[in-house]
Image (cartoon, grey):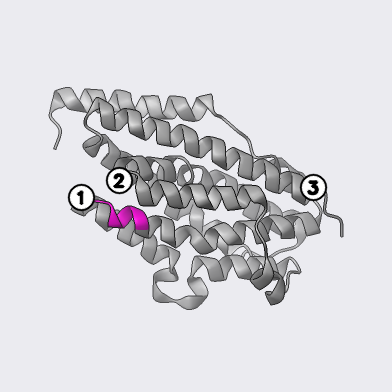
Amino acid sequence: MPDSQNATTHSRFVEELFAIQREHSFRDPMFDAVRSGSMSRAGVRLWTLQASLVVRQFTRFISAIHANCPHRDAQQLLAENLWEEHGQGVHSRDHYSLIRKMALSLGATGRDLDDARPLKETDEYIAHCLKVTRELSFGESMTAIALGIEIFMPVFFGSLGESLCSKYGLTRDDVDYLLVHVAEDEAHSRRALALLESYADTTELQEKAKRALREMLLVKRRFALAVYNHAKEETE
């Protein structure tokens, strides 16, 4: 474990990660469009179909980080994360099953889900996540996924879930995919941050992690804007 001098360095490192998040601060326009009820139901359905393509691949991202992780305590977190993604062994609680249920509640059919094709930016986002988690180090990939993606989900998904219930007539059971992330991803991000403080213990590792975070935030922003703009064009 790090000594007190290194702990100070790591605390500064974490602040630098948060500074990168602020530098690339981005409010997904879908957040306000759904909260105000201005996004059409068809648009929300399209957003959900594109999101489902990412969700279907997310377990591969976690598995790849786990395979590249040399630290037992970090492996434990990743194993727990993967188990939760798979619904802790209950098929109906599997996160892909949950987002399919949400899409169906918005009027999609099983065929729509099975035949969904990614936008170019969705494809690029998935490809980037696979590349980062397969080819980069544990510290880089953990930073990119935990701080580039998961840390934002509790606020965004929590608000989205509540708005879909109040503005679009869905039930809390329909939006369970969104609500499960409020508690799960907050815990994942907090524990991942502590692990990064411990193991990103050289300037080289920290710089690589910061670069991975910047790149993930940029790719994710392009994905979010593309899906929003495509959804906005949809009409009932």
Disc 2 marks a residue whose amino acid type is Phe
Residue at 76 percent of width and 51 percent of height:
231
Distance in Å between CA atoms under marks 1 and 2? 9 Å
Label 3 packing within 10 angstroms: few (<14), some (14-19), many (20+): some
Closer to the eye: label 2 or 3: 2
Disc 3 element: helix
Task: Say if residue 34 shows up in the picture.
Answer: yes
The amino acid at mark 3 is Lys
**Gap between marks 2 and 3 measured at Cα:** 37 Å
**Above or below, comparing residue 97 to residue 225 in the picture:** below
Q: Which residues are the magenta region?
A: 64-69
Label 2 near label 1: C-beta < 8 Å? yes
Residue at left 34%, top 32%?
A: 208
The amino acid type found where label 1 is placed reads His
From the viewer's perspective, tell me whether residue 82 is left or right of residue 175: left
> Which numbered mark, 1 or 2, is in the foreground of this view?
2
Residue 96 horizontal side relative to residue 186, left or right: right
What residue sits right under mark 1 in the picture? Answer: 71
Q: Magenta includes 66?
A: yes
Query: In the image shown, does 121 or 54 lie closer to the viewer?
Result: 121
The residue depicted at 67 percent of the width and 65 percent of the height is: 116
Which residue was labeled with disc 2? 138
Which residue in the protein does label 3 denote?
232
* Residue 173 visible to an observer of this rendering: no
Q: Earlier in the sequence, mark 2 or mark 3?
A: 2
Q: Is residue 147 magenta?
A: no
Q: Secondary structure at mark 2?
A: helix
Quadrant of the image occupied by residue 47: bottom right
Total marks in image: 3
